[in-house]
Image: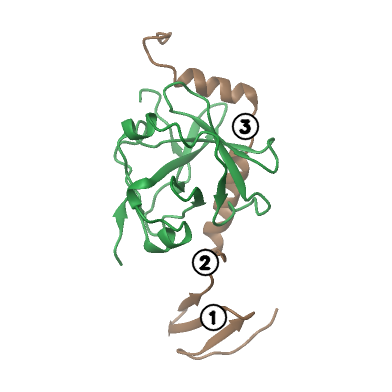
Chain colours: A brown, B green
Amino acid sequence: MLVLTRKAGESVMIGDDVVVTVLEARGDVIRIGIQAPRDVQVHREEVYKELREANREAASPNDAAVRALTDLLRPANAEPPGD
Amino acid sequence: MSTRTASRPIGAIMSDTELEMPIIDMALPMPGFPAHRQFVLVRLNDEGLLYAFTSVEDPELRFLVAPPEPFFPDYAPEIENEVFAALNTKDPDRLLVMVVITAGVDATTANLLAPIIVDRDTRRAMQVVLTGSNMPVRAIMRKDY
């Protein structure tokens, strides 16, 4: 991993068009600003990982699960609930 | 920063059939699926409550998605200007909100933190993280919608 030391107000370039700027350092909290092209996604790492995991879980449900959900969404008067 | 709600009445979505097969381009890929950039929305339910967001590149890949209004009536995500820019949105009223559903054996959940926003005019979409909203990634879907 490349390690650089930067002060508040200083930046790092990643490639030609991503700029990461240290805005403020207060104790162990660092505020950073990121300028990136629209087609570059910027997320907090933990949010990105949680979303990726949720998407993988949601992807390509099997037919039984889809059928169960379709039944669930059927209008109540078409099939009265059993309980 | 100016924001506005993308909540829409369900009637407007149910009567909207124009998005059923046209190809939707992802402005950004869905996290975890970087290779899938084009999808179609396939209606699975006569009432328009359930759709399959299906990859054009790989029809085996599909996500169940639903309009949130019938299930989460209070859900009104605020969409930021960056999203309008990414989707080339001219008219925010033409945005469609879909939540990604995980169909489980015991519980079915919806991802309220990161809905898929579709612009019906530009046919561009992206999964938007509602940063700071504290919305759940796995909200239980009520049966008595």
* Horizontal relation, residue A28 to residue A2: left or right: left
Which of the two discs, 3 and 1, labels the residue nearer the N terminus? 1
Question: Are the numbered discs 2 and 3 placed on the same chain, yes or no?
Answer: yes
The disc label shown at residue A61, or none: 3
The answer to whether the residue labelled 2 contacts the one labelled 1, judged by CB atoms less than 8 Å apart, is no
Check disc 1 and report the residue beneath it.
A19
Asked if residue A33 is positioned above or below residue B69 in the image, the reply reads: below
Identify the element where label 2 is drawn: loop
| Image quarter of the N terminus of chain A | bottom right
As shown in the figure, which amino acid type bears the numbered disc 2? Arg
Mark 2 crowdedness (10 Å alpha carbons): few <14, some 14-19, many ≥20: few
Front residue of A29 and B115: B115
**CA separation, marks 2 and 3?**
31 Å
Q: Position of residue A78 (x, y in %)?
A: 41, 9
Distance of label 2 from label 1 (alpha carbons): 13 Å
Mark pair 3, 1: CA separation? 39 Å
Question: What residue does disc 2 label?
Answer: A38
Q: Quick one: B30 or B86, which is closer to the camera?
A: B86
Rendered location of residue B113, percent (x, y):
44, 49
